[in-house]
Image (tube, rainbow, N blue to C red):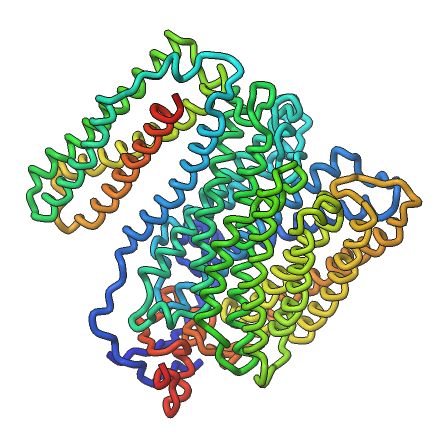
Amino acid sequence: MSSDAIAIQTAEATGRPWVETLHEWVTTVDHKRLGILYILYALFFLAVAGLEATIIRIQLMRPHNDFVSPQVFNRMFTMHGTTMIFFVIIPVMFGFANYLVPLMIGARDMAFPRLNAFSFWLTAFGGLLLYFSFVGGNGLSGAGSAPDVGWWAYAPLTSRAFSPGHSSDYWTVALLVSGFGSIGTAINIIATVVSMRCPGMTLGRMPLFAWLNLIMAGMVILAISPLTAAQVMLAVDRYLGGHFFDTQAGGSATLWMHFFWIFGHPEVYVLVVPAFAFLSEIIPVFSRKPIFGYPVMVGATACIGFLSLSVWAHHMFTIGMNSYANGFFAITTFAVGIPTGIKIFNWLGTMWGGRIQFKTPMLFCIGFLFQFLTAGLTGIMLGTAPFNWQLSGSYFVVAHFHYVIVGGIMFALFGAFYYWYPKITGRMFNETLGKLHFWLFLIGFHLTFDLMHIPGLLGMPRRIYTYEPGRGWETLNLLVTIGAFVQGIAILVFVSNLIVSYFKGAKAGNDPWDAWTLEWSVSSPPPAYNFASLPTVASRRPLWDLKHPEDPDSRYE
Amino acid sequence: MSAITTPLPATPKDWKLPYRGDVGMACLIFAESAIFTIFVVAYLFYVGKSLTGPTPRQVLETPIFYTICLLSSSLTIHLAGKLLERGRRGKFLTLWLLTIVLGAVFLYGTGQEWHRLIYQHGLTISTNLFGTTYYSLVGLHAFHVTAGLIMLSIVLVFGLVGRVGPEQCARVDVLSLYWHFVDAVWVVVFTVVYVLGR
């Protein structure tokens, strides 16, 4: 069968009533539209969580500041953490997976399109529910308040005695609902990758993006489910008078910590594995070389997935576990460094000897490599139990995980935004603005999070709403806040680039980067059915084979 | 905006991938197993830690009959699937109905036991840790049985109006996979609650 991707320009229906367009988007089951909905939804919550972070930073800018009250401060860090993890990074990763996985494996849609829509709307309503707590958190008594128990929601803070009203319940139910959505999407991604690949797309020829998202989805299933169970238990405690985490009746606060971190640590890898997936697509294209060590990359990621399930208690060294448990969790934590190191070397190996093009997506990926490495090193410091006893609960920890999430995951995410923007919108972004975004964000990031380590080492605890002058924290905190504003400006540049380029950008064409995976074989944006006839592939780089019939990859496989 | 027209390689022969329903259900079962694992861990962790009575030893009675009912329903649903494959709709529906009845009898048994515990022994979900963990774990399982019964009944209704034939075999198999899982979980819950937890 000779098949090819036929590019059909979707007819521009002008002058349609906006209600009709809206109805189409709300009822859509198309994986591309759901992907875009996920991404836009996450961008909205990124702005919200960014605003909360700004409020936190203004409050901590100088000692004895009274920009917000302690109560509001508690709500801000709780909502910032919860929003960023559950309503920004998970949805945006799902958005990219939704949009790209079917295109990359040559499928017309996900395995279960309606489940896909259902999962998105569950996640969407979860987010709305969380933010409705600002209005409805106090129930009938009126004032309204958001959850203020921290994103770990440790017992007994969540018990009725310490959290009256409904703010903690909004937190519980929002995470429960969005958790079901995440499990639904994870099931969908796995079923899509396993059952929907186009002819010839064996597992060994799948783009690494699809591989890594498959592993991510597997981890979502194993990590989010325990959280769901723990949330049900918390709801039983709060509404039915249960005693799971009620220490007065023999219950255990430590058990909640275990259940939370059995979710919480794999969750970090749920977020970072898709970031790895972005890098594994972007770096080869801009180095003009195929990925170095493909099977090892898959193996190392699977290895990270397994290891991440056995490291959770390194968040709990200070609760007083015995030395065997401390030793075990320290060693497994160090062990994660091995497959992660392999991956970093493989990306460097891909760049080595390549003709590197320093386009905006590639700049962000290179930033990722440096920053993620540093974040990993402070992670190993914190994984050392005695070191952790000193610095647990300090700003050093805050700096460490923001280095992972902002310096690593967000950088990879920005790279992905720029890399696939032409595919999704059909327009090129503005390269100058992109580079400006990169450099501003890089400077702001380092100003904020490099310096944030130091007050932590000097003993500044996390989650304090203010501090005494004269401890040597003032200048550092001021600089950290200034860095946060620089990052804010960079984000504004990013968003304005997205908006302006959508209307004014040059037409992108099918394949602006001269890339090799199937999504670049269809028009930009792709038609609703993706492929007019299903493609057939014979190597890892089907588009290379098409462009170089004299020397196709399939000859060497 | 030019389409790429170079011919792609020929379709490999017998390109067959697993049925997406089976894969999806297998993933759902993994997720559910993780949820049950957390509840089982909580149950085992709190065995003997209640500060007040009643204790499991005082009040629990082993539901042997109802367990046999539930486990044998796995057999009937399996046979029903086989019969549907061979196109014997009447026998399929009979066994399918039998599966539903066995599941319902099990659910009735759980209800009986709860009624006895609440009204005779005063054990509720808020009495002590045993009550909290017992009702959550057994209740979570009973919830899954209920969900399964609803889905089985939907298939029964479609079957009675003649809409379930051999062409739906793969879908019916997905549902029976779920039902087997519900039964397998009961083996674990039974062992934990009535054997280890005494």
Q: Residue B126, relative to residue B83: is it above or below?
A: above
On the picture, is A277 further left or further right than A200?
right
The number of callouts visible is: 0
Q: Residue A340, relative to residue A248: is it above or below?
A: below
- Identify which residue, A261 or A184, lies in the foreground: A261
Residue A21, position in %: x, y? 46, 55
* Residue most extreme to the front: A324
On the picture, is A327 further left or further right than B9?
right
Can the viewer see residue A536?
yes
Q: Quadrant of residue A287?
A: bottom right
Residue A127, position in %: x, y? 56, 43
* Residue most extreme to the bottom: A550
On the picture, is A26 further left or further right than B82?
right
For the N terminus of chain A, the image quarter is: bottom left
On the picture, is B75 further left or further right than A281?
left
Residue A307, position in %: x, y? 51, 54
Please give the name of the residue rendered at 69% of the width and 69% of the height, measured from the top-left corner: A438
Please give the name of the residue rendered at 64% of the width and 79% of the height, measured from the top-left corner: A358
* Residue most extreme to the right: A470
Residue A233, position in %: x, y? 50, 30
For the C terminus of chain A, the image quarter is: bottom left
Can the viewer see residue A17?
no
Q: Quadrant of residue A248?
A: top right
- Identify which residue, B63 or A156, lies in the foreground: B63
- Identify which residue, A384 or A94, lies in the foreground: A384
